[in-house]
Each structure stands twice: as structure tokens, then as C-alpha cells.
Amino acid sequence: MTISIQPTNNPPEKLQPKGWLKYFSFSLDHKVIGLQYLVCGFLFYLIGGVLAGAIRIELTSPLSDFMPREVYNQVLTLHGTIMIFLWIVPVVNGAFGNYLIPFYVGARDMAFPRLNAVAFWLIPPAGLMLITSYFINGAAQSGWTAYPPLSITTPAAGQIIWILSVLLLGGSSIFGGINFIATILKLRRPGLKLMQLPMYCWAMLGTSILVVLSTPVLAGTLILLSFDIVAHTGFFNPSLGGNVVVYQHLFWFYSHPAVYIMVLPAFGLVSEILPVHSRKPLFGYTTMVFSIMGIVVLGLVVWAHHMFTSGTPPWMRLFFTIATAFIAVPTGIKFFNWVATLWGGKISLNAAMLFSCGFIVNFVLGGITGVALAQVPFDVHVHDTYFVVAHFHYIVYGGSVFVIFSSIYHWFPKFTGRMLNENLGRFHFIITFIGFNLCFAPQHWLGLNGMPRRVAEYDPQFQLVNQISSVGALIMALSTLPFLWNIFQSFFYGIKAGNNPWHALTPEWLTTSPPPVENWEGEAPLVLEPYGYGKKEPIEIIKTEEE
Amino acid sequence: MTSIAPKEQSSEKEVQTEEHEDLRLFGLIAFLIADGMTFAGFFAAYLTFKAVNPLMPDAIYELELALPTLNTILLLASSFTFHRAGKFLESNKAKDCQKWLLITGGLGVAFLISQMVEYFTLPFGLTDNLFASTFYALTGFHGLHVTLGSIMIMIIWWQTRVPSGRVTNQNKFPFEAAELYWHFVDGIWVVLFIILYLL
Amino acid sequence: MSAIVTLVTSVMLGIGGVWAAYNVNMLPVSASTNAPVYDELFRVLFIIGSILFIGMTALVIYSLFHFRRRPGETGDGIDLEGNISLEIFWTAVPAIVVLFVGLYSYDIYDRMGGMQSLSSHNHENHMESNAERLWGGIGSGPIETSSIDQSSSLPIELTAMQFAFIFHYPKGDIISGELHVPVGKEVSLKMESKDVIHAFWVPQFRLKQDVIPGQPTILNFTPTKSGNFPIICAELCGPYHGGMRSNVIVDEQEDFDIWFNQNAKETISSL
Ligand code: HEA
Ligand code: HEA
Ligand code: CUA
Ligand SMILES: [Cu+2]
């Protein structure tokens, strides 16, 4: 039991399709699965983005004139669900997790390759089901939170399909989580200690713990909800003696941790990217590890901050206020450490770096509005308004999506063996950053001044600001074009990257690009210092050996 | 290759087929933790309903203790017999192992039957009131687990037959997995019994 | 040296934040006893938030600029893996800030009446509700205002349904689609929903409370400014959620009395 080689239950390599076909097959290779997650997630992102576009078009005028009111609610429900469950969660966890974790622990594949493939292949059907539900009697229209009794009284077909597809996606997420825990804890190359792992492993370990502990509760809740819809039980139906607030507690017991499921892996990715491009070790490794675990623990006990106006008792509100606000402490440690990583480095201002720094700036703003929202007396005014919409888009878009872009710029050479065009990448960053801030910054003001969320019609005094926001959304949509062009262009004609274009020290760069099927031709390298930049022997040596 | 990656391995090393340690049991445990959280959610819901939502005045919600107590005994006994079967598998006595597996499976089925009897004799139906619904949801979800477990036991029973079965003391994983799962289902029942019937 | 420059700039920007907090109007007019308390909290949060945000942004931009790789430069940055005292420093500072914010907002919450227990309050007004369980919205107790007449609060019942708010005044048995209340008098709103969850929100009062079916909830507030303010439903409740609005008309006591007498059941029947 020394080095983990191909797990025995893998079928012989010959049976696996070769070439591009493998990306459309039930492949067991973690790298193929990772890219399948990435591409699939990105396609869903475009769909979710078009839906966001529809929302922003509707909101350029105070009347409900672009689409029928029911359709608006369906669109915003699908937008939220797709963006969370089919874009951010699968990509920051599934895509990068599958691609990178085996490299980082020095393994040839994930612990359970077959389960891994199953977890991925649950996603496309679930997503397609969700989208087609629009054409059968209309999609779900009670928001991504699906609060009963509204979700019980709206047309059942759409809601049931929504529940089924979220259940499938949750199942996929749980399988993935089990796989990551097993891989990180049990598949480490001999000689590699936990505290020598790259930070992304810790982030994925924490995330997977959250997934395993909280997703099943959502599954159970949605099963009860579907009983209410189909079998007319009364769990959450007050007219039958049920209790709607219980649903909210159970839902947020999952969905608050879910926000850390969306952002902790992004934290991990940033921790990989910043040291490479600033040529400095990651600052404060140990505190970073502890802050991740702190976020995991705190993240499990703050869910009721989404329910401050639901008539919860005062002591409960206070407890959740304090617990929530304290998440700022471990999160703050991470941010200060990242800035300290930049400090005194030799920073390359490339697209990966810019997107990561954009993430820091955006997330700090989103986090600060989050800490404000955590204060009960503040929240009772802005709950369910555009202030909340601004808060979470600053985090999910300005945070997670920026990190995804940053990671694509960083790892594209490894994925394909070719470099992306940096100038186009910087241009992509600049317009994304401008469009993003133009779109969501004004929404803070809207919320504070009286515009509720999830409305297709609003007070005319908010028209101008909404139009500004819509222009921002348009710029964001346009910013996707240089990115897509860059990907296509570079995929075929990009400069050859070589094995390690960034002279990085983490293990995935110590093999060919793209890597061979079992990751390394020979034995897995033992990387004890993934962040050993600036050590005695300059990185340049590696470069000469490479050529 | 780079300076960090060791280069010395030669091409014949490529055929090394060392496998990593068997992690399936580890995976199963993680899965059972997840499954347990589903039950935890249900329990939390039930307890909150109980604390906050009074029973509507005309609602009927009474449970008898006799059958569920019998059920508890059945399940606890089956955990024990399963363990017993494992002992025999270890000492390679397939016949005895099969016998005890059969008993275990029988106890599982007996549990399911007696659960059905309870369902049909209860004075309330699924949609009668909140507690009735929760009762059926909880016991039903657990019953589903018992059904799956019983099927698993039957499959294992078939697979432990000699000489052609695939589960032996060389290949114990399916047996151990089913046993662990069965103990888990059993443990959940004890919690469920306390919460639903005794509280 | 560079650190001092950063420090000075961020302090200046912080001062800019304080200035903005006091001079840029970011909230609608304040029209209840709750609102000035709320605005105070908002200002404090805004100042702390701007200092943190601007400081962090300045640090990032400064590092990107100052430590950027010049053309032709090779080699790595300094080999610096951590610093215990720095870590302690930036664990302690956010912890203190958060603790301060938490305690401060507890105080605000208390002043808004959030910690008042329901049982000590308001039961006389909703006698019939003694049997059923009531939930408290924020502001379920009175706010410390000696000037305001608290001898008795005005009980009103709110029924929310898809897609309207209906107000019922038990005293005059008035049913109205709009909420009429006198200035300076505490209103005790008992809210219940007929179908799905709605929310009662008056931005100018800085108050919001979900109206939950099966969970009657009390919300107390005292308007301080006469005028006409929107009541907005803030919880997704179906297709016409966006159109589910009404008005709260805050009148001087005399004007309110006139309206009340014109509409009260006894008056109508005696005509
Ligand atoms: C990835 C997603 C993500 C993340 C990471 C967060 C992070 C946080 N969120 Fe957010 N949130 C959402 C996604 C996310 N949120 C979504 C989707 C919703 C809406 C759901 C819906 O209703 O549809 C929501 C809603 C939401 C609410 C409910 C609002 C309402 O509906 O009324 C609250 C209230 O407490 C909240 C708080 C917080 C806090 C305190 C954090 C903290 O974790 C932030 C911590 C970070 C920082 C504070 C910044 C860095 C720290 C420093 C620089 C140190 C110094 C700082 C201080 C001392 C303050 N969020
Ligand atoms: C988790 C990730 C995530 C992401 C990435 C986004 C991205 C965006 N969101 Fe999303 N949003 C949510 C999660 C997310 N959102 C959630 C959870 C809700 C709550 C739902 C609910 O209330 O239930 C929500 C709600 C929400 C609302 C509030 C709706 C309402 O309450 O009425 C708005 C309004 O402006 C909005 C806008 C946008 C915009 C403009 C983008 C943009 O960033 C998108 C940019 C991307 C593209 C535009 C795609 C690429 C471009 C093309 C494919 C070209 C073609 C484009 C067009 C035709 C426009 N979102
Ligand atoms: Cu009523 Cu929204
Ligand atoms: Cu949350």
C-alpha cells in the first residue's frame, strides 16, 4: 500500500473512448469529468445569463410589459436555481475539485471513479428537466427558495419537476462530497501530511463536510414539500394545520451552508492562484486552514438570519445575529492573508491575477453588506429588497464567478496545453468589472429606498436607477463575448504552453499539459512545499530543466 | 520533467498494479452520516411541530404501544442475528452463516409486516392531520430503508451459498456493508421509537 | 513609507465615508419613532463599512501597482510565510469590530422594542387572542419616547390575501383598504394572512414583518410624520406580488378623528 495507482475496479483503459468522444462518455478519468463539469456548467451559465437578461429587460420599465407576470416569476426562479445548482456549485466543486484534488494529494484518480461519473451524469438530465419544465405547464414560480404555501398553491407540475431536479442535483452533490472527503483523507501519497496539502484541498474538505451534513436535510424537506403538493398532506400547509416556518428553518439549514459551498472552494482556488502570480508563499497557511474550519462550523449555526422577519423569538434573532456576524472574523483572516501574500511580491498583472484581485474587492463589499444584514434591526428594513439582491450578487458573481474566470485563465494551459490571450483576458476583466459594478452597486440604493425584490412592476421613481443597472447587465453580457472568442481562438491557435508556463510549484504543473491518463508517466511527485516561492534555489532552475 | 518529480522509474514499472486501500466502507459511512442527517431533519421537523402546532380539536392521533414494541424487539434481535451470521462467515461456515442471514431477513420482513398491520389498524390516515402525516412520513421513510435492507440481506444470502457464491470471508465487503447499514437502520428505529411513541 | 501613504489615503477616504454617511441621502424620509434609531445604526454601519471596504481596496490596488513585475524582471518575491503578531492583530480587530457592532445593534434592537416580551404587552387590546398563540414582530414593544402618548395604543387588524391588504379597526368596526393612523400614537397591528406568506413593509417606518398564514403576529409602531407612505408587500406571493401595495395615511389627530367618525359603524348607522 504505497502509491495509489489506478483503482482496481477501473475497467481496462482500452474500453474507454479516446479523443474528444471521451468528453461525451461515461468516462472515469477525473480530468475528463472535471472538464465535463466545467463545460456543462458554463452552458448552464449562459442559459441563466439569458434569463438574467430577460429580468433586466423587464425591469427597464416600471410596468410589467415585457413578459406576463407568471412568466417573470418563472424566469427568476429558474435564474436563481440554474445559477446556484447548475453553475456555481458544480463548477467550483465538481469541475476544479475533480481536476485538481487527485493531483494535489498525489493520486491517479478520485477514490471512487465510478461514483464520480455517476455524480456528473446526474447533472445534465436534471438541468434539462428543469428547463423543459417551462414548456410543460410552466416552470416553478415560487422563487429558488420555494416557500410554502406559495409553492403548494402554484401549478403543481412545474414545482414537482423543480423538486425532482433539485433532488437529483443534491444527490450529485452528496456523491461528490463523499468522494472528495475519501480522496483527501485517504488517498494521500505516502509521505504527504495534511498540513502540506495545497489550500484548495482544505477548502474542498470543509465544503464537502458541509455538503454531507446539510444537503440531506434539504432533500428531506423537499420530499415533505412534494408530499404536500401531490398527496395533500399538511406539513407546510397552514390550512391543514401545518407550519410554514418549519420549512424555512429546514430550507435554510441547507441553503445557508450552501452559500459557503459556493464560496469556500473559490477561496481555495484564489489561494492557489495568488502565490503563483505574485511569486510569494501563501501567507499564514495554518491560520488559513483554521479559518476554513471556523467558517464550516459557524456556517452550520447561522441559518435563521434569513428569517428575521418571520416572527422568530427575540433570543433566537440575537443568537443568529451574533453568530452570523462572527463569520466575518475567519473570513477576514483569509482576506488579510491574501493581501499579505500580494505584499512584497513580484506581481504579474495578468488576467488570472486581475480576476482574483477583483474578487477580493467585490467580496469584501458583499461581505460587509452581509454583516450589516446580519443585524436584526438593520435587516427588518432591507430584507427581501434589492439590497439583499445586491449583497448576494456581489458575492456570487463578484466572488465566485470572478474566481471561476480567474481559474480558467490560470489552468487553461494545463487543460489544453495552450495559453489564453492575456490582452484579451485583461480587456475581459475590465469590462466585466465595470459592467458588474454598474449593474449591482445601484441596487443597494434601490433596496434601501423601497424597492422589494421579485417584482415585475415597481414604483416609477426607481426607473432611472433600474435602467442604469440594466445597462450594467448588458455590459456584463457583452463581456462574455471576448472571453468566448479567447477560448475558441486559443484552443486551436494559442501559443503552446509547455508543462509549466507559470513556473508554479503545485503538483498539477509537474506533468505534461494536458496530463496523461494517470496523471504522471512515472511515480507521483512528492511536493512538500506547494508554496515554496522565493526559496534558496530560484524557480528558474526548474525552467531550464524543463527545456 | 521537472527537478521536483523523481525521474528514476523505468518503463517496466508502468505495469505496477498496486491498489489503494479499500475505501468503500469509508464511503458507506460517509453516506450513512448523510442519510442520518435526512432523518435528523425529519425528527427536528416533528419535534418542532409538536412544540408549536397544537393538535386541531377534532383530530385523532393515538398510537398503541404493543406493535411498535414488538417491532423494536424484532429489529434489535435482527441486528444480533446479523452479527452472528458474520461470525460464521469469518470462520468459513457458510451453511450456518446462511441460516442466520435467513433469520435476519425473516425478522426484517416480519418487521415490515407488523408495520403494515399497524398502518391498517391505526385510526388515522396519511392526510388526516399534521401528526398523522409526520408519523407516516417518518415511519414510511424508515420502512423504505428496512425494505432496501431486507432485499440486500436476501441478495447476500444468495451470494454466500457454497461453492458458487461470491461473498466469502475473502470478499467480505458486501456483507460488512449490509451489516453496517442494517445496524444504522436499527439505530434510527430506536430514536424514532423514542421520539414518536414514547415522548 | 509606502505603508504611511496607504494609511493616510485610507484614513482620508474613511473621512469621506463619514461625510457621505451624514450628507448623502441614502434612505427615504424617516416617519416613525423607529426610523431615527434605525438611521443611527445605518450611519454607524456605513462608516465602519466604508472604512473597511476602502481600506481593503486601497491595499489591493496599492500592492498591485507597487509590487508589479517590471519588464525584464525575473525571480521571486520575498520568502515570507507568515507572521504571528500580524495574524493576531487581524483576528482581533475584526473580532472587536464585530463585537462592537453586535452589542450596538442589540442596543438599537432594544430601543426599537424588539426585546419586549409580548405577554407583558398588548393583551388588553386583543382580548380575543388570549387563547391563541401570538408571534411578535420586531418593535413588539413601545419605544422609549416620553413625549408620545402611550396611554393606549390603537389596535388594528390586518388581513393580507392575494393580492391586497385589508385593515379592520375593531373599535369602530371600520374596514378599509388603506391604513389610516394618527401621528404620535402607537399602533398595534395584528396581522394574519388568508393564503400565502405576505409581508407588511413601510420603508419610511423602517419596519417589515412577514404576514404568515396560521401565525398571527403583532407589530407595533408609532408614526411621527404626517403624510402618505406606501405599504409594500415584500414576500413573493404570486403573479401580482409586485402590484400588492397600499398606502398608510398618517394624519394629525383631528383629521384622523374626522376620518374615523365618518367611517365608524355607529356613525353610519346613526345617520
Ligand atoms: C456565496 C454566497 C454567499 C456568501 C459567501 C454570503 C456571505 C454572507 N452573507 Fe449572504 N446571502 C447569499 C449568499 C452569500 N452570502 C444569498 C444567495 C442570499 C439571499 C438568499 C435569498 O433570500 O434568496 C444571502 C442573504 C443573506 C442574509 C439574509 C438577508 C435577508 O434576506 O434579509 C444575510 C443576513 O444576515 C446574509 C449575511 C451574510 C454574511 C454575514 C456573510 C459573511 O460570510 C460575509 C463575511 C465576509 C466579510 C465580512 C468580508 C471580509 C472580511 C473582512 C475584510 C474583515 C473585516 C470585516 C468586518 C469586521 C465586518 N446573507
Ligand atoms: C448564483 C449565481 C448567480 C449569478 C452568477 C447571477 C447573475 C446575474 N443575476 Fe442573479 N440571482 C441569483 C443568482 C445569480 N445571479 C439568485 C439566487 C437570485 C434570486 C432568485 C430568487 O429570488 O428566487 C437572483 C436574482 C436576480 C435578480 C432579482 C430578480 C428579482 O428579484 O426580481 C436580478 C435582477 O437584476 C438578477 C440579475 C442578474 C444578472 C444581471 C446577472 C449577470 O451577472 C449575468 C451575466 C451573464 C450573462 C448575461 C450570460 C452571458 C451572455 C450571453 C449568453 C449573451 C446573451 C445575453 C443576453 C441576451 C442578455 N438576478
Ligand atoms: Cu403579497 Cu407579495
Ligand atoms: Cu445565509
Image: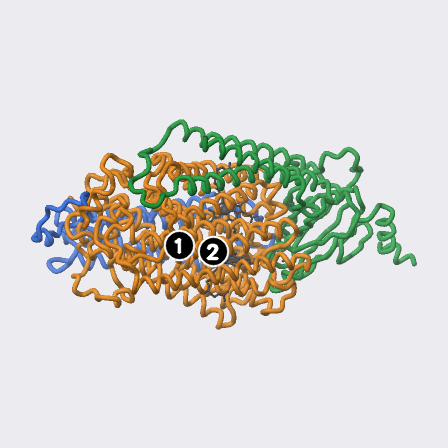
Chain colours: A orange, B blue, C green
Residue A531 x, y percent position in the rendering: 29, 40
Give how far apart the Cα atoms at labels 1 and 2 are: 10 Å
Outermost residue to the right: C271
Residue A463 quadrant: bottom right
Residue A27 x, y percent position in the rendering: 25, 62
Q: Which mark is residue A271?
A: none
Q: Secondary structure at mark 2?
A: helix
Residue A465 x, y percent position in the rendering: 62, 56
Residue at the image point whose x is 31% and y is 34% from the top: C79
Residue at the image point whose x is 92% and y is 59% from the top: C271
Badge 2: residue crowd in 10 Å (few <14, some 14–19, many ≥20)? many
| Residue type (three-letter) at the residue carrying disc 1 | Phe
Residue annotated with mark 1? A405
Q: Chain of mark 2?
A: A
Residue annotated with mark 2? A432
Q: Does residue A193 appear to the left or right of C133 in the view shown?
A: left
Which residue is more in the foreground, A245 or B22? B22
